[in-house]
Image (spheres, rainbow, N blue to C red):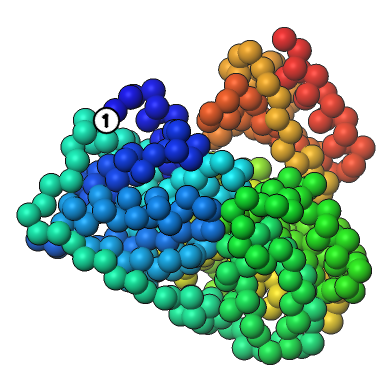
Amino acid sequence: MNVRNLDQVFKAYDIRGLVDSELTEDLIYQIGAAMVNALEISKSNSGAGAIVIGRDMRESGFRYCKAFTAGVVDSGVDVIDIGLASTDQLYFASGKLNLPGAMFTASHNPASYNGIKLCRAGAKPVGAETGLTQIKELVQRGMGAKATTLGNVQQLDLLSDYAKYLHQIVGIIEVKPMKIVVDAGNGMAGHTAPRVLDIPGLEVVPMYFELDGTFPNHEANPIDSKNLVELQKKVIEAGADLGLAFDGDADRCFIVDNEGELVSPSALTALIANQLLLSFPKSTIVHNLITSKAVPEIVNEKGGIAVRTRVGHSFIKQVMAEHNAIFGGEHSGHFYFRDFWFADSGMLAALFAISELAKSEHTFHKLISDYARYPQSGEINSKVPNVVESMDRIVAAFADGNQIDRLDGVTVTSDQWWLNVRPSNTEPLVRLNVEANTQDRLAEITQAALKVIRDF
């Protein structure tokens, strides 16, 4: 197996590549067999003896699942196939069945891509440091599948169980009459939302619920604001109380308020944290270092414990487990829940927002304003010839009189603003995030930081 090709598809947290060129059925078969060996999944010892798999709506998904299944079965391990699923539905299956899992998705990437997100039993993540590197090495060595007794394949529909479990976590049975617009982006929310959002009192206005891995209407990537423009217009046009947008595998959720304005994921993090601290006082809430400083402020005001972590789901899940945190939020639209095996669920975050609005006398625009305290730049990427030199220039330019830390890239903090510059894992890019107490100060610091970064 070509090492260079493997390096292209094995990422830090998942496997991803171009369909039928970088990611072939033969490679998928070998990955299935390698997962069995690397994670020591076996019927002959105390191991689980089975892997649960799911797939999104991409056209290559069915045959990729078939190839992966063959690799697992030929290795003597069973496969439980839950069929079409969102990524958090696969995490639910892994947690409920206490089995390792494989989700076939390329998330928000274009139609020409597919990939695999892997987890251990109980939805524990598999990344470069927790099994993915070993799987790559086994594929590289051409270990193949070896078993005298083949595994079996079982089809299992868990959609209703998944929806019921989410309702139980939030404690939602019915709501006051409300209208919400949901943009599934032709992704897996079109599969899960009709069941999960079937709640008495809730009227759902669907947008692009038809499953289509070619994404004919817009990219299923709500972190890019241009993909939310239609949802914003529809919320106003329909007179809706809320708008929800999901990415391709529906593990991320972004919100538009009743006035058509985009809601910061940091504000949603603070809102959910406040809800959960009412039910679980003095609990720990984890947030990554580019969320708004309003998040730890609000957590502390409500009697909780705020813990700051690096950007990336493997880091936030690890820190949550270490602190038994009730909830974790990332500014990228990922929201993690202890009662959901510390895994992320965009649909669960949406239910918490709906539940909070249903209990409030205010509109969502008014409700969320209490949690959105400071203006933010959003993430700004810059291509640079030398990432390290760019970060060093930031330190030299902004260090005087300010606090510096290197938890993830470089963070500079003053009493009026903070900025973070961190490298991309895959490209010669640096990512800048800035927050300030006022809009004018935000513009000033953002412009100054970009000038320093790009002055090469």
- Looking at the picture, how far across and down is residue 371, in whole percent? 77, 61
Spot the residue most to the top. 456
Q: Which quarter of the figure is the C terminus placed in?
A: top right
Q: Amino acid at mark 1?
A: Gln
Looking at the image, residue 197 lies above or below residue 211: below
In this view of the protein, can residue 114 be seen by the observer? yes
Residue at 53%, 30% in the rendered image: 425
Looking at the image, residue 126 lies above or below residue 452: below
Neighbourhood count class around disc 1 (C-alpha, 10 Å): few under 14, some 14–19, many 20 upward: some
In this view of the protein, can residue 328 be seen by the observer? no
In the foreground, 239 or 210? 210
- Looking at the picture, how far across and down is residue 376, in whole percent? 79, 44
- Looking at the picture, how far across and down is residue 437, in whole percent? 84, 44
Compared across the picture, whether 32 is left or right of 267 comes to: left
Looking at the image, residue 164 lies above or below residue 100: below
Residue at 84%, 26% in the rendered image: 447
The residue pinned by badge 1 equals: 140
Residue at 18%, 62% in the rendered image: 151
Quarter where residue 424 is shown: top right
Q: Secondary structure at mark 1?
A: helix
Looking at the image, residue 73 lies above or below residue 157: above
In the foreground, 199 or 328? 199
Residue at 24%, 47% in the rendered image: 33
How many marks on residues? Answer: 1
